[in-house]
Image (cartoon, rainbow, N blue to C red):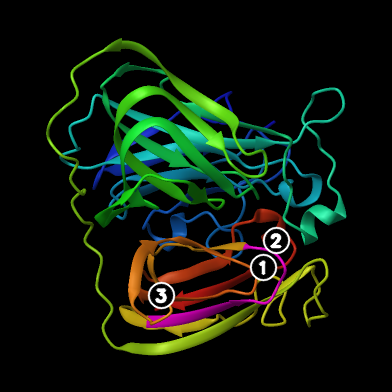
């Protein structure tokens, strides 16, 4: 297993919004590596993407990442994406980066919940083998699911903020949470203008959900698919307090430019995988008949242009599509903007249209965040000048 500072997941980082984050990365691996700061609006040179933004950090060398954490109000991921993942199946390692509001909501506890999925061999050790089927089906799915919680105790009546993070390479989690009464207040670090009731929650790889809720019993996270209720982890009762009478309110909105006139549109078709027809790419997957980063960007835009991308899933598997350096609006079937996200889940046979103001200069990757699919072809990019 790989880790940050000797642990996996790595230790949590907390920063206030608009603070300057400085992180010195020392590569103690046998291979080159990078650090990608998922969900953060940051300078392109700090994005940690090989070829597009920086060269890999070679073994026994270091690199300092430095940028303001001004692009997201809630919570993001700090992700190391080592090159061996593409060859040996060693996973990236993660640590949570919590970006706090200048005036955080009044809660008794602010708890981070990192969903985890790992495959073990017959001896109970991490399975280093990669089957070809892992690349061309649903991905490298584990046989052990759990949750790393920053706190495992709460009082009956506590008012808590629970930050759900799915940093797994390929698994889509569908979970329910027992013992809480409250609401979803943010998706992918962006506050929701209207509260969303708790129910079964679906998180594709790299997606996040913030919840504010009152503790009404032992808080148990359960995976509902395929087991129908496998326990992933819990926060156990220890004491009691009076439940607060004040209603839960939406978080203050982030300052995100609203799209004006759409100046460019683009389509990309997701192709490949088991059971799919041939395509023009060299890998198991492709966007528009190209596997891997194409020579030309999907869109080349001037700064502050509003663009629209129609994503068509012509495959038999779902794909979580992530855009670096920006958030975008999902749209409904009538074209109305709905949720502001940085990662959207597109089901088999589904078409998802997103709208984005490209206001952050640089070369930005757009890819499937099922990393087995990305490694085998599902990636493109946008250029903002």
Query: Which residue is drawn at the image coordinates 87% and 27% (left, top)?
Result: 122
Q: Position of residue 282 (x, y in %)?
A: 81, 74
How far is mark 2 from mark 1, CA to CA? 6 Å
Q: Earlier in the sequence, mark 3 or mark 1?
A: 3
How far is mark 3 from mark 1, CA to CA? 24 Å
Q: Is residue 299 left or right of residue 291?
A: left
For the view shown, which residue lies furthest in the left direction? 246
Tell me the magenta residue range. Answer: 307-318
How far is mark 2 from mark 3, CA to CA? 26 Å
Q: Residues within 10 Å of mark 2 (few under 14, many from 20)?
A: many
Task: Look at the image and say whether residue 328 sits in the magenta stretch.
Answer: no
Q: Say whether residue 64 is visible.
A: no
Q: Position of residue 195 (x, y in %)?
A: 26, 51
Residue under label 1: 378
Q: Is residue 337 left or right of residue 350?
A: left
Residue under label 2: 373
Q: Quarter of the image containing the C terminus?
A: bottom left
Residue under label 3: 332
Q: Position of residue 15 (x, y in %)?
A: 30, 37
């Amino acid at each position: 297993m790989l880790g940050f500072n000797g642990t996996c997941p790595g230790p949590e980082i907390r920063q206030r919004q608009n603070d300057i984050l400085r992180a010195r990365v020392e590569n103690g691996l046998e291979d080159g590596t990078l650090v990608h700061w998922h969900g953060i609006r940051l300078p392109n040179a700090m994005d940690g993407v090989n070829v597009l933004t920086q060269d890999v950090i070679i073994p026994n060398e270091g690199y300092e990442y430095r940028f303001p954490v001004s692009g997201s109000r809630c919570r993001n991921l700090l992700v190391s994406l080592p090159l061996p993942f593409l060859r040996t199946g060693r996973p990236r390692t993660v640590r949570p980066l919590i970006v706090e509001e200048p005036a955080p909501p009044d809660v008794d506890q602010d708890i981070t919940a990192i969903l985890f999925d790992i495959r073990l061999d017959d001896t109970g050790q991490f399975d280093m083998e990669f089957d070809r089927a892992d690349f061309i089906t649903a991905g490298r799915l584990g046989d052990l699911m759990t949750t790393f919680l920053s706190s495992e105790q709460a009082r009956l009546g506590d008012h808590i903020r629970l930050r759900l993070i799915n940093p797994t390479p390929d698994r889509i989690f569908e979970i329910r949470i027992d013992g809480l009464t409250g609401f979803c207040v943010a998706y992918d670090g962006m506050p929701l203008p209207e509260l969303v009731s708790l129910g079964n929650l679906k998180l594709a790889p790299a997606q996040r959900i913030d919840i504010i809720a009152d503790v009404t019993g032992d808080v148990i996270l359960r995976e509902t698919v395929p087991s129908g209720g496998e326990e992933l982890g819990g926060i156990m009762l220890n004491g009691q307090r009076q439940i607060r009478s004040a209603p839960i309110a939406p978080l203050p909105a982030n300052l995100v430019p609203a799209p004006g006139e759409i100046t460019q549109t683009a389509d990309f078709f997701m192709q490949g995988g088991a059971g799919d027809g041939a395509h023009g790419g060299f890998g198991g997957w492709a966007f528009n008949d190209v596997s891997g980063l194409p020579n030309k960007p999907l869109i080349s835009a001037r700064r502050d242009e509003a663009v629209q991308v129609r994503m068509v899933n012509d495959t038999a598997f779902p794909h979580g599509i992530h855009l670096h350096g920006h958030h975008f609006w999902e749209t409904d079937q009538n074209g109305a903007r709905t949720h502001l996200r940085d990662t959207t889940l597109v089901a088999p046979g589904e078409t998802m249209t997103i709208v984005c103001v490209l206001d952050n200069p640089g070369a930005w990757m757009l890819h499937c965040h099922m990393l087995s699919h990305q490694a085998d072809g599902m990636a493109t990019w946008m250029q903002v000048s």
